[in-house]
């Protein structure tokens, strides 16, 4: 299949530029598009065949449900039943934006989209291209992250081309996703709102609006052997993994530097190159090894925005191993470490 690539300037585009993409979605075809979190692989959420094609293109297990994207908060009632007051409160505060809510699904939503569940995940993105595409297509757009299942999510069109070219109908290149981590997911179907996936909108942000929120047990997991099952089906799969084994090194900064530098030297002595996932503050402190910077510790958001891109970059280098600094002390640390721990298969070296 030929994948059409369309470039759109997020800050200066007219609707005509999106009409073909909108028509593709409306007619059951698949279009990858930018959102403020990561790129999404979109198809008509009410079209079971389109949903099936999304799973096939990504190689995604069919029990891993898709998030339905809307352009108008008023559309909640078309997709969900028994909507609690908390959903409207959250929509008022955080939509459009990087928050996904889990609600009881309405009959209109096919189970092909919800991975067989009776609940549905709904988000209203703030990215202007995403919002215009949804509105112009006239349908709700089911869209998981636009990556091959298991690989890091995509934050630039180049990543999408790498994973999905030839497998989908169109890719809209709208530049880099600003946030770079997938949406926060909150489940509103139980008594207490439950965070199933941490993201840019933090537990504190949610608690400020809702009073009480809890984390699903699976979210804060720190080791592969903890016997907890994540409640979001997608969170149980190995994810984000670069090709080389990845180790997170935690401890005082000096100790981390010494440890990583000693390991890098050991690999070098065997003729192997080690990668280092570092920050602007530390990049010069690793004299050997291949250093990639996620961002700067002075601005927490740059690390979130650069994480997936950096993980992907290592795959092009042929390094034998990757050592990463920890970002647990970052204000977005819960979300960043959730992704990084998965990428590392929970391999943490604590000094
Ligand atoms: P992605 O769009 O690739 O970021 O993946 C969507 C995430 O949302 C996955 O982790 C899914 O398991 C989760 N998700 C989607 N729908 C539901 C649902 N109805 N209940 C719980 N988790 C969901
Ligand atoms: Mg994903």
Image (cartoon, rainbow, N blue to C red):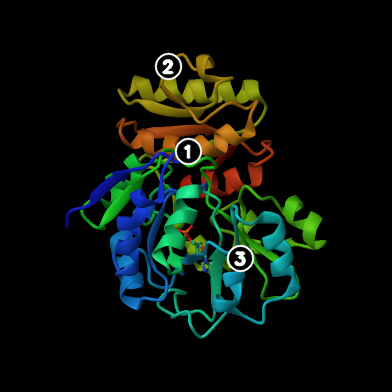
Name the residue at the left extreme.
1
The residue shown at (75%, 75%) is 191
Q: Quadrant of residue 23?
A: bottom left
**Quadrant in the picture for residue 90:** bottom right
Say if mark 2 contacts mark 1, CB within 8 Å.
no
Q: CA distance from mark 1 to mark 3?
A: 23 Å
Helix, strand or loop at label 3? It is helix
Position of 22 with respect to 257 (left or right) is left
Dot 2: few (<14), some (14–19), or many (≥20) neighbours within 10 Å? some
For ligand 2, tell me if the residue under mark 2 lies within 8 Å.
Answer: no
As rendered, which of 178 and 18 lies closer to the eye?
18
Q: Residues within 10 Å of mark 1 (few under 14, many from 20)?
A: few
Report the residue marked by disc 1.
11
Residue in the image at 56% along x and 20% along y = 282
Report the number of numbered marks: 3
- Please tell me whether mark 1 sits on a helix, a strand or a loop: loop
On screen, 272 above or below 307? above
The earlier-in-sequence mark between 3 and 2 is 3
Looking at the rendered image, the disc whose residue lies closer to the viewer, 3 or 2, is 3
Residue 216 percent location from the top left of the image:
66, 64
Q: Residue furthest bottom?
A: 107
* Residue at image mark 2: 288
Give the position of the N terminus as an image quadrant. bottom left
Going from the N terminus, do you reach mark 2 or mark 1 first?
Answer: 1
């Amino acid at each position: 299949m030929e994948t059409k690539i369309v470039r759109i300037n997020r800050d200066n585009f007219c609707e005509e530029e999106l009409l073909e993409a909108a028509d593709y979605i409306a007619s059951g075809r698949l279009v990858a598009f930018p959102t403020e979190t990561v790129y999404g692989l979109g198809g008509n959420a009410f079209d079971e065949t389109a949903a099936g094609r999304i799973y096939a293109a990504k190689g995604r297990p069919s029990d891993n449900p898709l998030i339905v994207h809307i352009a108008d908060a008023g559309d909640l009632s078309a997709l969900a039943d028994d909507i609690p007051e908390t959903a409207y409160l959250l929509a008022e505060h955080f939509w459009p934006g990087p928050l996904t809510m889990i609600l009881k699904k309405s009959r209109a939503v096919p189970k092909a989209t919800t991975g067989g569940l009776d609940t549905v995940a709904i988000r209203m993105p703030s990215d202007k291209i995403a919002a215009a595409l949804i509105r112009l297509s006239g349908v709700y757009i089911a869209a998981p992250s636009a990556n091959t299942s298991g690989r890091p999510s995509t934050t630039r069109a180049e990543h999408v081309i790498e994973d999905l070219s030839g497998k989908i109908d169109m890719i809209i290149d709208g530049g880099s996703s600003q946030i770079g981590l997938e949406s926060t997911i909150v489940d509103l179907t139980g008594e207490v709102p439950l965070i199933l996936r941490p993201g840019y909108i933090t537990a504190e942000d949610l608690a400020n609006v809702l009073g009480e929120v809890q984390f699903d047990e699976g979210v804060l997991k720190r080791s592969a052997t903890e016997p907890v099952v994540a409640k979001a089906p997608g969170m149980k799969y190995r994810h984000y993994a670069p090709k080389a084994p990845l180790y997170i090194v935690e401890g005082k900064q000096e100790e981390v530097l010494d440890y990583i530098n000693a390991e890098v030297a050991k690999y070098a002595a065997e003729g192997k190159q080690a990668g280092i996932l570092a920050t602007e503050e530390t990049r010069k402190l690793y004299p050997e090894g291949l250093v990639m910077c996620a961002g700067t510790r002075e601005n927490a958001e740059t690390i979130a925005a650069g994480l997936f891109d950096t993980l992907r970059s290592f795959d092009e280098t042929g390094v034998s191993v990757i050592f990463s600094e920890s970002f647990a002390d970052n204000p977005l640390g819960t979300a960043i470490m959730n992704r990084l721990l998965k990428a590392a298969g929970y391999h943490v070296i604590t000094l």
